Image (cartoon, grey):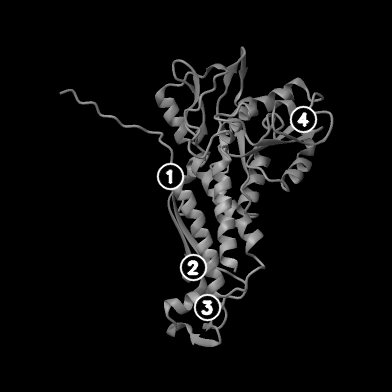
Amino acid sequence: MGAPSISIAFIEKAQETIRRGERGIVAMILKGTTEGATTIFSVSDIPASYSAENQQWIKNVLLGYETSPRKIIVYMITDVNNYDKALTYLGAQKWNWLVIPTVQTDEKTAEIVAWIKNQRDNLHLTYKAVLPNMAADYEGIVNVANGYTYNGTAYTAEQACARAAGIICGTSDSRSCTYAPLPEASDCDRLDQSALNDAVDAGKFVFFWDGEKVKVCRGVTSLVTKTTTKGDSFKKIRLVEFMDMIRDDITITAQDNFIGKYPNNYDSKCVLISAINEYFHTLISEDILASGYCEIDIEKNMEYIRQHGNVVVVGDEEIALEDASEQQIKEAVTGSYVYLRAVIRMIDAIEDIVLDVYIG
């Protein structure tokens, strides 16, 4: 009785995502005297052998926002020429956001952008990075464009990236990092409203002074140029996080509980569709999605059929494609492939309030 198990697996994955309370995992590349990886959950896990500067970068990430990030995977390199070693290691780990406090100084920013794009576009992994002064025009890159003052020290945009990554990964699924405060900061660039608007429109993640404290202006990615496949949703960190979360959850859960375990017939496809729709329903109930549904992709089924002789095979029956009904195309044998399409509508956070006050 496979149907309940796959459905339960997807529901549990959704509930696990909702329960976690914080957004994700930070990966860090630092420079030190000993090469290797360390996993850090709290300040007490920071190795005493790390330099004071490296310890501070980690502490800045752990400040988070509503909560600290789930964990930090630190890879220490001894030389700027060892970035490849760090990326090879991190490419086999599970994390969400990469930050490198010296990436601009090391002249590695463009290299990191190219690596992130390859991971997302070609390998279908959901890695993202927080980088300084990098107009990547890409949803997987956050472009930190200014810094702030902390304990009398002015942090540059490069140095502020660790704090930004902590804020992003310490934001729960019920919020965005827009207007997240930095209670430890005493000042930042005093940008006026026009300059802030221009910065956000240019895909810049900036800090601003609200008259009392330092805040994140708006939680945006560096994406500026919209396409037919990437609209305004790809400009919001919160919504990109949701897209990546859904992709990861469905991919991993299907791999663990479905692939290789069911015959590829119509009934099995319906089992998977039902399970994914249950997953969407759970996210809808938690206000992560406004709506969502999954179904067989008829167009891709037809494309498969055309590539295999224009014959629709349903059970032991063969039907010419032009004579097949929509239901028969849905039920068609498609080798080892399951072609599905999902349509979701995500719920954004409140970020813009328009209030007209009338005096009677």
What crowding class fits label 2: few (fewer than 14 Cα within 10 Å), some (14-19), or many (20 or more)? some
- Tags 3 and 2 touching, CB below 8 Å: no
Residue that extends furthest to the left in the rendered view of this protein: 360
Label 1 secondary element:
loop
Residue 31: mark: 4
Q: Secondary structure at mark 3?
A: loop
**x, y percentage for residue 285?**
45, 48
The kind of residue on which mark 4 rests is Lys
> How far apart in space, not on screen, are marks 2 and 1 (Cα)?
25 Å
Vertical placement of residue 295 versus 318, above or below = above
State the CA–CA distance, disc 4 to disc 2: 48 Å
Residue 139 seen in the figure = no
Instruction: Answer few, some or many: residues within 10 Å of disc 1's Cα (few below 14, many 20 plus, some between 14 and 19).
Output: some
Q: Residue at the spot x=43%, y=85% of the render? A: 323
Q: Which amino acid type is shown beneath numbered disc 2?
A: Asp
* Alpha-carbon span between mark 3 and mark 4: 56 Å
Q: Residues within 10 Å of mark 3 (few under 14, many from 20)?
A: many
Tell me which numbered mark, 4 or 2, is placed earlier along the sequence. Answer: 4
Front-most of residues 237 and 264: 264
The first of marks 3 and 2 along the sequence is 2
Q: Which residue is mark 3?
A: 332
Image quadrant in which the N terminus is located:
bottom right
Marks 1 and 4, how far apart in space? 39 Å
The residue located at (61%, 29%) in the rendering is 161
The type of residue carrying mark 1 is Ile
For the point 43% across and 41% down, which residue is it? 348
Residue 254 in view: yes
Residue matched to label 2: 297
User: Disc 1 designates what residue?
Assistant: 347
Q: Are marks 1 and 4 in contact (CB under 8 Å)?
A: no
Element type at marker 4? strand
